[in-house]
Image (cartoon, helix red, strand yellow):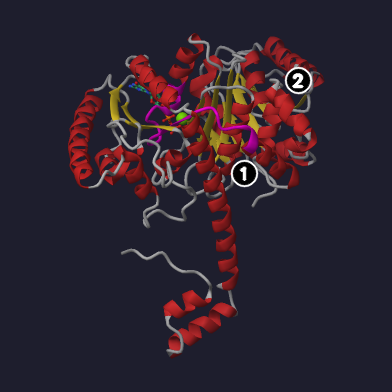
Amino acid sequence: MDALVDKIRGGERRSLARAMSLVDQSGADAEALKDALRRETGDVPWWGFTGPPGVGKSTLIDALLGMLRERGRRVGVVAVDPTSPLSDGALLGDRVRMMQHAVDLDVFIRSLATHGREGGLSDATLHCARLLELAQYDPVLIESVGVGQNEVDIASVADICVVMLGPGYGDEIQLIKAGLLEVADIIVVNKCDTPEANRLLAEVREQGKRQNVESRKSKVESPKSKVESRKSKVESPKSKVQTSIARGGSHGLASEAPPTEIIGIEAKSGKGVDALLDKLLELDRTARGTEQRQRYRHRRILGEIKRGVMLACEQNLDRALTAPAAKELLAKLERGELSLDAIVAQLGATPARHN
Amino acid sequence: MDTSRPKRILIGKVGLDGHDRGAKFIVQALRNAGYEVIYTGIRRTPEQIVRAAVDEDVDAIGLSLLSGAHNELFPRVAELLQEEDAENIVLFAGGTIPDKDIPHIESLGFRKVFTPGVPLAEILSAIEGELAGRSDGGGAIV
Ligand SMILES: Nc1nc2c(ncn2[C@@H]2O[C@H](COP(=O)(O)OP(=O)(O)OP(=O)(O)O)[C@@H](O)[C@H]2O)c(=O)[nH]1
Ligand SMILES: [Mg+2]
């Protein structure tokens, strides 16, 4: 395994590509490599991009790739698209928008399928991002599937979280109400070549102002940082099977989180993307402090532990709840011999209480 | 947890024609048949196709072409794969390719050449057959 790690670190592209396939599987070799990666990486900030399908995530990443290359950075990209719930197959189409960088050896793009994982990022996303880091790509960009809960998932994995909005999806304001402003480090309104996007940009700015006033007010009472509220969002009981430790954990990354930046762009023409990149690079620099790095490393690994334990528990529980055991429990409940709470206690789980 | 993953196929269009209804149809069909399909879009160069295929560690490449430049572009793809030491990636071709050119293309290492009118079921079973014996990509590197 050490030999493989050395090869990847030394820039052997084919080893990197095949290692990415390996970590998309389980088995002794795969697990050994994943553990080596956990030990060997954690210094490079990951930039996450999320937003509804078609909002322009890949187009934006393509524009950023060009600009980062001009600055001499070697860039890694992990692009995640959904697995079909019906066939296990997937259409991984993000590359269509990034082909101008396809032959640049200082860019490495890898497409992944979600494999049905709820949060919109496959487990392999983390491993592939770590592999890119090991191969000296810096920064690492992650494009996630943008529906439902996924914004939250990317926020718990990426160091810097960009949420993209655009015209024609209708639900943006609802997304914002649902807490997107707290999850995002930067909100990008794309397609500002259209009047609808400009209207949306104005609305989001308005919403952002209100939110900042509110959070300033609440800060007077209790010094709650953006990171902490982000955490409570991610860990709220509403979220499905919780797969990740929230950003910052109990020790927030910054006690004085700046207000979320709101930037309008045209990803296709590149207009406004330079201002966005400046902001990203600024966040990237602050994310490089040693203390921050250690915290992010640990948070990701704790997230993986948590997810592993939850999967195991879920499997055990599924087994316990199949017949004939389940039949007996149901019969007892119906005869009034056991309460639901008693059954829950008997199965060894203490349900999270919402107070 | 899954011990195996779906097979990965890159579908790309080389050549200058800008029409990809056929390629998209195949992309959709392969996805529905359980493959992870990496679609690269139209007007790609052999260099772009091969770089993407190697980085994505695909099991197969399906090249589509309508413009008639197959006698230049297909050999180039095969050659680049060799340079990359990636001949284990299975090659397929599809498009308007005259019957007389098919033996030459097959001699370059293309396992199957699908011309218009070949039923979808036949394409899918041919691809499945060619990929069946392959072990998962990552296993061999450790
Ligand atoms: N008008 C306009 N269209 C844009 C802009 N940026 C991207 N688009 C178009 O939006 C469409 C979707 O772009 P993508 O980059 O593929 O979007 P995406 O968010 O990556 O999509 P998924 O990965 O499928 O979720 C394409 O047709 C782009 O050309 C823009 O600034 N203005
Ligand atoms: Mg995309």
Q: Amino acid at mark 2?
A: Ile
A118 relative to A267, above or below: below
Q: Residue at x 41, y 64 (%)?
A: A352
The numbered mark 2 sits on a residue in which chain? B
Mark 2: give few (<14), some (14-19) or many (20+) Cα within 10 Å.
some
Q: Position of residue A76 (x, y in %)?
A: 56, 24
Q: Quadrant of residue B54?
A: top right
B26 relative to A335, above or below: above
Whether A50 is among the magenta residues is: yes
User: As drawn, is A233 to the left or to the right of A101?
Assistant: left
Q: Quadrant of residue A208?
A: top left
Q: Does residue A238 show up?
A: yes
Q: Amino acid at mark 1?
A: Gly
Residue under circle 2?
Answer: B102
The residue stretch that appears in magenta: A39-61
Residue under circle 1?
Answer: B34
